[in-house]
Amino acid sequence: MKSPSPLWHPNTQMSEWTSFPEIVSAKGMWLYDSKGGKMLDGVASMWCNVWGHSKSELVSEIIKQTKILQHTPLFNLTHPSAEKLSKKLLQLNPKMKSVFFSDNGSTAMEIAIKIALQYWRNVGENKKTNVATLENGYHGDTFGAMSVGYVPEFFSKFRSKLFSTIQFPVPRTVIIGSNTKKSSKEYAEYCLSKIEDKLEKDNSIAAFVMESGAQMAGGVIIYPKNFQKRISQICKKNDVLFVLDEIATGFGRLGSMIEYQSQNSTPDIVSFGKMLTGGYQTFAATLTTKKINDSFLGEFSQFKHLFHGHTYTGNPTAAALSLKNLELYKKYHLIEKIQKTSKIFKDRLDDISNLDLVGEIRHQGMVMGIELVQNKNSNKPLSSNISINKLVFEEGRKHQIYFRTLGNIIMLVPPLDISQKDLNFLIDGTISTIKSLSRKL
């Protein structure tokens, strides 16, 4: 890549970089650059890749659909791919009734929020206008998503323009160790009691929004057993809509096809994205129950319908691609493979945790978060004059691994279909990278 380039990269301090590796092709788990180098895709191209790159069935499906119908809107029209995909998603989510397509995770959550708030207006309840969330959550970078998934490090500069939410603590081992003498179980109960007390007393809460199974961008915060189930029950008891975000955690990332089902919780609204297309195109979906869907029906003059739409809503190519991707899950028994392959993470925990810079490690399914710390006893985050992301990226590249950190947390989020051999290569490269950092810092 020539420097300087006019291209502005996401979440990047551009002054730290003079150039970026130029990826010219990809095959399987590997990314190939213009200088002949290669890196194993350790973050599944931002958590979305399922099968690795250049999966023949998916590429063929894109070509096939593109020859037939490239794009037509869903404004007053429909097409076979969107119809078939909506039915497939409802088969996977039998308690859902309707599907609203969009083009990325942030917009899918914007749609979920708008549906939740308008639902109460549609049924004549105008006092329910507030949204409850978990601290440390993340739902995207658009303004509604920032409001319900407020991460101070990311969004503090926009705080005055975001709508307020009611936030509740989430069980986190590191915080428990430093702020309270409660056990993990006791702290989880404390968090749930705060939620229950508030929802029982405050009739203004329209919806409770949370990531399903784990907080991903928050650093792989895995919920304790029954935590999500209990919140679902509290919401139902207090007539609060339960809204789930499975953008990054659904379709196998945590080990289950539909994560909320494994959590024994039932949402009123749920959003999917990232892995819906196998990671080959941008696409997302927001699903609702019959109760929610029916509240938007009525005479046109009542204006109960949802005033929301995108140019590429239900794009035929992305919809056809998603159908093929979901078909491959079944054909190749992917969920069963994930559950087997992910055991390697557990088997190699000690190899990683014994390293000098490593604090807490959190793992579920095909994701692991590794805290880099200055001191193991205090869990004080590792710091540097330049971003930890850049340091880890450059060291990882030397070991043929593509990393993208979250602050001081190394995220291992490989393509779901990764082989045991390649997963061990990823873990070996992670260990070598951390050892190299230890010698330099």
Image: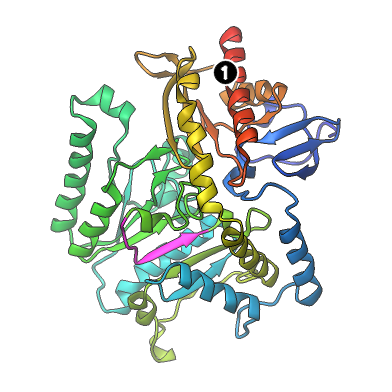
Q: Which colour style is shown?
A: rainbow
Name the quarter where the C terminus is drawn: top right
Q: Position of residue 435 (x, y in %)?
A: 58, 13
**Residue 93 quadrant:** bottom left
Q: Name the side, left or right, on which 5 lies relative to 170.
A: right
User: Against 79, is 37 above or below?
Assistant: above
User: Against 201, is 359 above or below?
Assistant: above
The answer to which of 375 and 153 lies nearer the viewer is: 375
The answer to which of 343 and 270 lies nearer the viewer is: 343
Dot 1: few (<14), some (14–19), or many (≥20) neighbours within 10 Å?
Answer: many
Residue found 58% across the figure and 54% down from its top:
275
Q: Position of residue 148 (x, y in %)?
A: 39, 51
Q: Name the side, left or right, on which 238 lies relative to 335.
A: left
User: Against 24, is 329 above or below?
Assistant: below
Q: Name the side, left or right, on which 355 lies relative to 204.
A: right
Q: Position of residue 82 (x, y in %)?
A: 60, 75
Q: Name the side, left or right, on which 335 lies relative to 268.
A: right
Residue found 47% across the figure and 72% down from its top:
91
Q: Amino acid at mark 1?
A: Ile
Q: From where the camera sits, is residue 141 visible?
A: no
Q: From where the camera sits, is residue 380 visible?
A: yes
Q: Position of residue 372 (x, y in %)?
A: 48, 21
> Magenta span covers which residues?
264-272
**Residue 151 quadrant:** top left
Residue found 46% across the figure and 46% down from its top:
254
* Residue under pointer 1: 434
Magenta stretch containing residue 133, yes or no? no
Residue found 64% across the figure and 53% down from its top:
279
**Residue 68 quadrant:** bottom right
Q: Which structural element holds mark 1?
A: helix
